[in-house]
């Protein structure tokens, strides 16, 4: 019995070992027929990942696997169209406008001032009465001088009659030559007394006239320095009169630009937020050694006294006028950091390009610059500071699509 059980257990073990061996043989055969099964599975997983990466790249760029291009949206005011225009080339000027003439009115006599008829800021005309001195003494002197001249004229008349009579008697031999000479000397003395009387009359007349202070020219009273009832010495200041019908701008121009400034050239300038025109009246013949500048004097008509003396003005002496030239706003000009050459950002379709340009005359007052090379009429350029720009950027102008539709 024990031997039979032992035999059954042995047979069962052998069968188990045979089944295990058969299973291992099937696995080995399968591995042998497909030795890269695991590798194919791993490669399939990797291919799926790569496919997903390609889809992401296509969504972000313009081409398969390409990087996205940067873009910018500009307002219509940030874009200017290149056109032909007129540019005025010249030399810039700055300075203060001042009256062409300032006159100090002073007392011509010593005396008591009785009346003053004008005040500061009042417009006066030439010959207008400004003030009056007490004049009784001067009037008396003039009356006395007039009486002296009348007496001198009477003496001259008598002396001349006596001379005429003596000349006739001398020819007839009735009197001596000595008597004729005496009458001739009497006429000379009488004429001298008449001349002295005339001089005294003119002097007293001037004193009487100077008791009335008159405006020497038309203008505006800038300062009134006296009041009625005061005693003034001869030469004392009384008024300051400003002739503001024509103002003058005195400006310093660098010596290297002064050769372009000539008498008679037109000057456009701005003063008190208004535009005015003037002309170059004078140019200093020397250069200031301290500033190396030349002073230019510009006369500015001022009808109606619209401008006041002391107003600050900026202007430009027009040396030449260029017509039908390519012009762009100066705000479109930029400078290369590498070589300092000017360039602009030109919009080519919807793509931003860098266009080097050559600049001619610059009209700073109008904010325009002449382009001699690099652009043509109809080109569109970016104006002002709109952020970071670069070649190849895609440009969209706000509202452009709506205007086209």
Image (cartoon, rainbow, N blue to C red):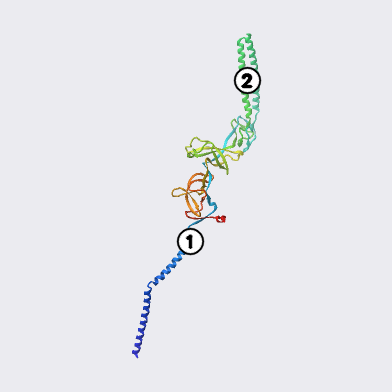
Image position, residue 207 (x, y; %): 62, 27
Residue at point 64%, 14% (across, down): 164
The residue most toward the left is: 3
Examine the rendering and report whether any part of residue 272 can be seen: no
Q: Is residue 77 above or below residue 221?
A: below
- State which tag comes first along the sequence, 2 or 1: 1
Give the crowd class for mark 1: few <14, some 14-19, many >=20 residues within 10 Å: some
Residue at point 44%, 67% (across, down): 49
Q: Is residue 391 above or below residue 14?
A: above
Q: Nearer the viewer, residue 330 or 375?
A: 375
Examine the rendering and report whether any part of residue 58 can be seen: yes
Which corner quadrant of the image does residue 243 belong to?
A: top right
Mark number for residue 60?
1
Image position, residue 271 (x, y; %): 57, 42
Q: Residue at label 2?
A: 194
Q: Give the Cα separation between the discs numbered 2 and 1.
A: 116 Å
Q: Nearer the viewer, residue 381 or 168?
A: 381
Q: Name the front one of labels 2 and 1.
A: 1
Residue at point 63%, 37% (across, down): 123
Give SS at disc 1: helix
Image position, residue 175 (x, y; %): 63, 9
The residue most toward the top is: 173
Total residue callouts: 2
Q: Is residue 158 above or below residue 352?
A: above
Which corner quadrant of the image does residue 273 belong to?
A: top right
- Please state, as top left, top right, bottom left or bottom right, where the C terminus lies in the image: bottom right
């Amino acid at each position: 019995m024990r031997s039979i059980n032992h035999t059954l257990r042995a047979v069962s073990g052998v069968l188990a070992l045979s089944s295990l061996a058969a299973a291992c043989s099937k696995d080995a055969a399968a591995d042998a027929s497909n030795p890269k099964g695991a590798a194919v599975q791993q490669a399939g997983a990797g291919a799926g990942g790569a496919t997903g990466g390609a889809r992401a790249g296509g969504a972000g760029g313009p081409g398969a696997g390409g990087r996205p291009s940067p873009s910018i949206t500009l307002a219509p005011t940030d874009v200017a169209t290149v056109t032909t225009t007129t540019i005025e080339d010249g030399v810039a000027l700055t300075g203060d406008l001042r009256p062409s003439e300032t006159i100090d009115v002073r007392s011509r006599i010593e005396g008591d001032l009785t009346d003053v008829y004008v005040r500061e800021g009042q417009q006066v005309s030439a010959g207008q009465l400004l003030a009056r001195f007490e004049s009784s003494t001067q009037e008396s002197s003039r009356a006395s001088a007039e009486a002296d001249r009348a007496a001198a004229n009477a003496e001259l008349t008598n002396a001349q009659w006596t001379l005429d009579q003596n000349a006739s008697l001398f020819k007839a031999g009735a009197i001596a030559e000595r008597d004729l000479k005496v009458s001739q000397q009497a006429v000379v003395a009488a004429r001298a007394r008449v001349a002295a009387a005339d001089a005294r009359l003119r002097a007293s007349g001037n004193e009487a006239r100077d008791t009335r202070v008159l405006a020497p020219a038309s203008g505006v009273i800038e300062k009134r320095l006296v009041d009625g009832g005061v005693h003034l010495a001869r030469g004392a200041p009384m008024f300051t009169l400003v002739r503001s019908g024509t103002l003058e701008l005195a400006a310093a121009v660098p010596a290297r630009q002064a050769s372009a400034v000539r008498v008679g050239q037109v000057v456009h300038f701005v003063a008190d937020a208004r535009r005015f025109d003037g002309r170059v009246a004078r140019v200093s013949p020397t250069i200031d050694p301290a500033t190396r500048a030349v002073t230019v004097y510009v006369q500015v008509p001022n009808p109606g006294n619209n401008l006041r003396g002391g107003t600050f003005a900026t202007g430009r002496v027009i040396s030449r006028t260029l017509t039908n030239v390519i012009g762009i706003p100066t705000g479109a000009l930029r400078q290369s950091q590498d070589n300092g050459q000017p360039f602009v950002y030109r919009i080519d379709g919807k793509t931003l390009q860098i266009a080097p340009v050559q600049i001619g005359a610059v009209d700073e007052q109008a904010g325009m610059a002449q382009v001699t090379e690099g652009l043509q009429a109809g080109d569109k350029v970016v104006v002002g500071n709109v952020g970071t720009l670069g070649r190849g950027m895609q440009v969209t102008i706000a509202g452009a699509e709506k205007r086209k539709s």
